[in-house]
Amino acid sequence: MSFLKNSNNGGPGVNRLLDALPKNEYKRLLPRLKTVSLVFGDVLYKPGEEIKYVYFPNDSIISLISELSETSWLEVGMVGNEGMAGLAVFMDVHFSSTRALVQGSGTAMRMSSAAVRTEANRLGSLHRLLHRYSHSLLTQVSQSSVCNRFHLVDARLARWLLMTRDRLGTEEFPLTQEFLSNMLGVRREGVSKAAAALQAGKLIRYSRGMITLLNRRALEAKACRCYAIIKAETDAYLN
Amino acid sequence: MSFLKNSNNGGPGVNRLLDALPKNEYKRLLPRLKTVSLVFGDVLYKPGEEIKYVYFPNDSIISLISELSETSWLEVGMVGNEGMAGLAVFMDVHFSSTRALVQGSGTAMRMSSAAVRTEANRLGSLHRLLHRYSHSLLTQVSQSSVCNRFHLVDARLARWLLMTRDRLGTEEFPLTQEFLSNMLGVRREGVSKAAAALQAGKLIRYSRGMITLLNRRALEAKACRCYAIIKAETDAYLN
DNA sequence: GCACATATGTGTGGTAACGCACATAACCTG
DNA sequence: CAGGTTATGTGCGTTACCACACATATGTGC
């Protein structure tokens, strides 16, 4: 959307956190960054596992998932081009407390945890941006928490689809209802019903694991205010 | 519990984050710290309001509350002697996104936001501890989120009472069921039922806004695993 | 000790979501 | 195109929690 400073590929799929860095600082980081492909289903960290790399998604999405048992999961945070997965490293914690699952295929910039720690000791722009992103993520997690507590599945599904769209940059993406139910922490049948309602209203179309958003404006109306709140926060923190 | 390094009052009501600082760094901070009394019901920050001071609770508790509307609240985080309220300041954000409500009367060490920013630029022990606390808080919020989604009111009430006890250091504290219902994001009648069940089992006793924990071990059994998970995290991060 | 405010209990009916079982439908593979 | 796999739909009984209304305590102040 906005003018992209550092990236030269020009597409919308550029990590905005890295892009917000001043040119010289970005250049210093560049040799430590490697573009990698993340594929739906990849698990970047398991709970308790050491974090070896952090990831700055370009057009991919990484879900942060908290697990209670084998059967009950809940997505507590979504990381796209506005942020970084592996934030714990920045906070001087070497192990992940959540599962990090690639929920949207695409590319990301990967950096070693050691490099992050070195950079974080510089008190430069990256340091400041990661601080501000930490706050943004905390706000996202908090808002999701309230949302999960009070809002109906329909609204939460709409919110979730919109958040995914914003990060992937496309209206169409592969997602089964089974998967969605795990993200939202509800039964598959619940998603089935909510999705059917959205499809009946021509807000979305789906078939066998492929979802297409048809009417974004209407979806935003269906979604709870949490979508707007989270979006405002994630968009604004980079300033 | 553990040996207290800096504080000289010796009681259990000492902010553990400050206490974990090396002596020289603590001494440097001391002139900027002021002991203040926090009284149940005090509002330290409202959403969107500027954060002028941060608070390191000694034996007080500060609840971080996310609001959806006038009627639906939810506590997303609890800050006691293991942490600091106003963490946003450390993350270079000047305004609070949540309401900060004193939920347990007691004292806290207060510091101006400006002083926090100055200190945070030093990359010293405070910097590191606040980083690690940030991670701890994020974990707490995430875990609460899953807990609120999946666990029954009974278990969540037990967890909440235990967390309060741990931070106040007493078995008896003033709390109406009305207030509890706001914290847990359920109806007062729901709390009433859950509390009655706990009282019937002699786990707690209560009357007109005063609650006494009678059997902590049994309460821990009633509470979900989330209590232990959060406790482990908040206790461990100081190392 | 009586009025009053506040805290807590209870009862009735409603609903969103659950768990389970099974039906249908779309795609894939040989 | 037959057969298997995976995705989605549907029905049924259950449950935790909701919303509202009201009853009953327990304290406080005159």
Image (cartoon, coloured by chain):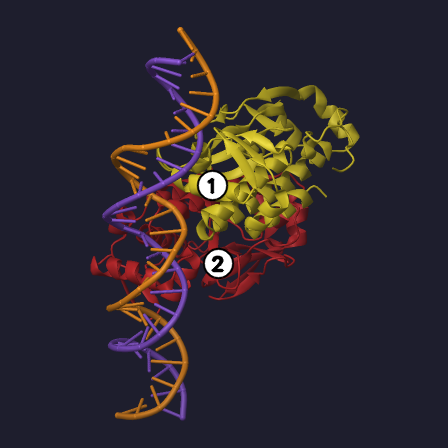
Chain colours: A yellow, B red, C orange, D purple
Cα distance between the residues tagged 1 and 2 = 30 Å
Q: Position of residue C18 (x, y in %)?
A: 33, 43
Q: Secondary structure at mark 2?
A: strand
Q: Is residue B171 left or right of residue A155?
A: left
Mark 1 or mark 2, whichever is nearer to me: 1
Of residues A216 and B190, the one drawn nearer to the viewer in this rendering: A216
Label 1 lies in what chain? A
Question: Residue type at mark 1?
Answer: Ala
Question: Residue type at mark 2?
Answer: Trp
**Relative height, residue A109 to residue D9 (above, below):** above
Circle 1 residue:
A196
Residues at badges 1 and 2 in contact (C-beta under 8 Å)?
A: no
Q: Position of residue B132 (x, y in %)?
A: 53, 39
Q: Quadrant of residue A26?
A: top right
Q: Quadrant of residue B185?
A: bottom left
Residue lying at 46% horizontally and 36% vertically, measured from the top left: A180
Q: Is residue B5 visible?
A: no
Check if mark 1 and mark 2 are on a common chain: no
Q: Is residue D6 left or right of residue B53?
A: left
Q: Is residue C13 left or right of residue D7?
A: left
- Tally of numbered discs: 2
Q: Is residue A173 visible?
A: yes
Circle 2 residue:
B73
Q: Position of residue A185 (x, y in %)?
A: 42, 40
**Relative height, residue B140 to residue A95 (above, below):** below
Of residues A130 and A85, the one drawn nearer to the viewer in this rendering: A85
